[in-house]
Image (spheres, rainbow, N blue to C red):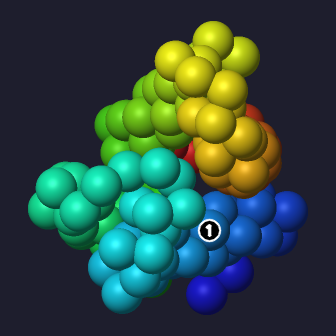
Amino acid sequence: MLEKYNDTPAAIAIILYTLGCAFYAFQLLFMTESWLAENGMGPETVGLARVLAFTWLGIIIGLVRTFTNGPDGNSTFFIALIVAQLGLVLNLWHQYLFPADAAAAATVLDDSIAVSVLALLLLIGWFRLRARL
């Protein structure tokens, strides 16, 4: 699987990013209500949370395909991932730094940190692979 990337550090960074995506997809699909309750959201948002879970699954499938077929020619996919990931980072940190109420800030700090780490892993992989994309 790593040989298609021809860059072990990039492959490891993208594998860790993929595992992070899988964690969020699993959490949003199978533990939706408890995740929403922990983040101060009501049951009316279950549908939206599951849509987000299936979005993460789509990203995972795209990433697995880059491992099986190689990353060559997937520039559009990686750019879309980077834009989406950086948007998530900015949105979560904005919610933390400028909360609607004090309780809201505490609920997004862990996700803000986790998504920032995932963004860093994705950027490491992309910077190492961008000549091949």
Q: Residue at x 55, y 62 (%)?
A: 38
**Residue 124 shown left or right of residue 83 in the figure:** right
**Residue 90 shown left or right of residue 36 in the figure:** right
Q: Residues within 10 Å of mark 1 (few under 14, many from 20)?
A: some
Q: Is residue 127 above or below residue 14?
A: above
Residue 119 seen by the camera: no
Q: Give percent across and percent down for residue 119.
A: 67, 42
Q: Is residue 32 above or below residue 44?
A: below
How many marks do you count on the picture?
Answer: 1
**Residue 112 shown left or right of residue 47 in the figure:** right
Q: Residue at x 22, y 54 (%)?
A: 45
Q: Is residue 18 above or below residue 105?
A: below
Q: Residue at x 14, y 62 (%)?
A: 47
Disc 1: which residue: 20
Which quadrant of the view contains residue 11? Answer: bottom right
Which quadrant of the view contains residue 8? Answer: bottom right
**Residue 1 shown left or right of residue 55 in the figure:** right
Q: Quadrant of the N terminus?
A: bottom right
Q: Is residue 2 above or below residue 83?
A: below
Which quadrant of the view contains residue 123? Answer: top right
Type of amino acid at the residue the image marks with label 1: Gly
Q: Residue at x 37, y 51 (%)?
A: 41
Residue 68 seen by the camera: yes
